[in-house]
Amino acid sequence: MLHLPWWGNTLAAFLLTHLSIISVTLYLHRHKAHRALSMHPALSHLFRAWLWLTTGIITQEWIAVHRKHHARVESCDDPHSPQQVGILSVLFGGLLLYRRATRDSKTLRKYGFDAPDDRIERALYTRFPNFGLALMLAIDLIVFGPLAGAIIYAAQLIWIPFWAAGVINGLGHYFGYRNYEVADASRNIVPWGLLVGGEELHNNHHAFPKSAKHGLRPM
């Protein structure tokens, strides 16, 4: 067990949650959903395993919901448009909207057709998504101790639902500035992609969804 000062536990929590952000933005978003970058299979699997441990995200569900968002953006079929359901519903209920969208088998088949379908995906990651979360809880408690481990685990649980499903999907289509006039309400929240791995530059992404770089600026 590590006996870290409060700032050490805080730093550990930030690093672990930021790794989850990086896993979502690089693996799920840019690599799988948009095919904007290629990735070595070993690194791809490392990200997939980490997301299983820390979020319980099933790759097919995530890429299907995200692709549908781009295909039906700001319409009544958009899984999480604040223009349709209100900013507070997305900001604080983004996870519920995501879960609702994942229950649509037609969406999964249409938009998630090329998701990983290897043996470990079928036997473990998709079949037992909550087992990874339980395993991560045990790891946190053993490594950081009962109190710090529980707090760090709680931070890991809420990080992606709040920042990705809430802030980016919500504020990213409601508040901020635009570099590009696109046919949706996407906004750049801030001009720096630091806290959420570049996803803050949401208008840039909607202008060039297949670009691996979100920090694009008009010439």
Image: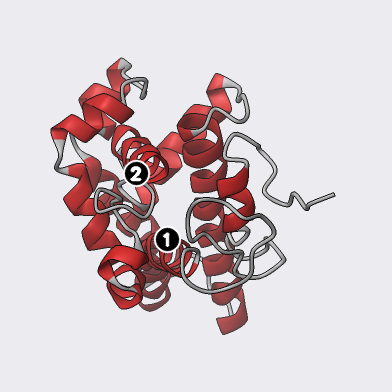
Residue at image point 39% right, 49% down: 73
Q: Which residue is mark 2?
A: 72
Q: Which residue is mark 1?
A: 169
Residue at image point 28% right, 33% down: 125
Residue at image point 30% right, 47% down: 56
Expressed as whole percent of the image width and height from the top left, the position of residue 172 reads 50, 64
Expressed as whole percent of the image width and height from the top left, the position of residue 117 reads 31, 19
**Mark 1 or mark 2, earlier in chain:** 2
Residue 197 visible to the viewer: no
Q: Which amino acid, mark 1?
A: Asn
As rendered, which of 71 and 146 lies closer to the eye? 71
- The secondary element bearing badge 1 is classed as helix
Q: Which amino acid, mark 2?
A: Arg
Colour scheme used in the picture? secondary structure
Q: Residues within 10 Å of mark 2 (few under 14, many from 20)?
A: some
Q: Residues within 10 Å of mark 1 (few under 14, many from 20)?
A: many
